[in-house]
Image: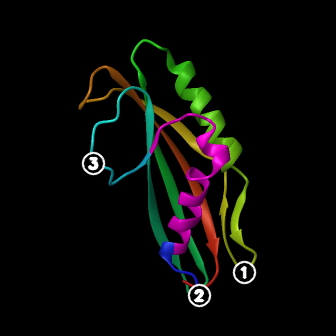
């Protein structure tokens, strides 16, 4: 039986994979406490429930790039994220998370660190399996 933890586990498994680590993009979950240096991403998962068998939601990725490196670097990171998630299904056949295609927006200089530029990439998903 699936639960919200299954969805989160599926997402974490991608970010913990050797292929993702090879990208060199520092990646942290939303509840990470600390101050990463330089460029990094931080992800969170917003869950919703639609009946007993389908869980929908959105993975939100905050992208932090060094100010004055242009928006191009943030878009390169989005392209990398898309190769791992967009249109992909992760998990078991009986219980899987399928990612759709996302949206990108810029937020400007980060309020906590004006040396970083913040962008956001939101990627909706559907989870099949009993919640």
In the picture, measured across the screen, residue 30 lies left or right of residue 70, that is left
Q: Can you tell which mark lies on residue 1?
A: 2
Q: Can you tell which mark lies on residue 94?
A: 1
Q: Residue at x 34, y 35 (%)?
A: 36
Q: Quadrant of residue 39?
A: top left
In the picture, measured across the screen, residue 86 lies left or right of residue 116, that is right
Q: Can you tell which mark lies on residue 73?
A: none
Callout 1 secondary element:
loop
User: Percent position (x, y) of residue 67?
Assistant: 39, 17
Q: Quadrant of residue 116?
A: top left
- Magenta residues (range): 6-27
- Image quarter (top left, top right, bottom left or bottom right) of the C terminus: bottom right
Q: Residue at x 31, y 19 (%)?
A: 115
**Foreground residue, 99 or 19?**
19
Residue at the farthest left position = 112
Choose mark 3 or mark 2, whichever is in front: 3
User: Percent position (x, y) of residue 13?
Assistant: 59, 59
Q: Residue at x 62, y 67 (%)?
A: 126
Read off the residue under disc 3: 33
In the picture, measured across the screen, residue 66 lies left or right of residue 6, that is left
How many C-alpha atoms fall within 10 Å of the one at disc 2: few (<14), some, or many (≥20)?
Answer: few
């Amino acid at each position: 039986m699936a639960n919200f933890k299954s969805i989160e586990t599926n997402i974490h498994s991608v970010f913990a994979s050797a292929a993702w680590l090879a990208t060199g993009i520092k990646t942290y979950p939303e509840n990470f406490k600390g101050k990463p240096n330089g460029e990094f991403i931080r992800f969170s998962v917003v869950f919703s429930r639609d009946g007993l068998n389908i869980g929908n939601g959105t993975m939100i990725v905050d992208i932090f790039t060094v100010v004055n490196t242009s928006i191009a670097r943030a878009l390169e990171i989005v392209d990398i994220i898309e190769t791992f998630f967009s249109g992909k299904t992760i998990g078991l056949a009986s219980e899987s998370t399928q990612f759709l295609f996302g949206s990108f927006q810029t937020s400007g200089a980060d309020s906590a660190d004006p040396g970083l530029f913040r962008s956001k990439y939101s990627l909706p998903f559907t989870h099949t399996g009993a919640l």
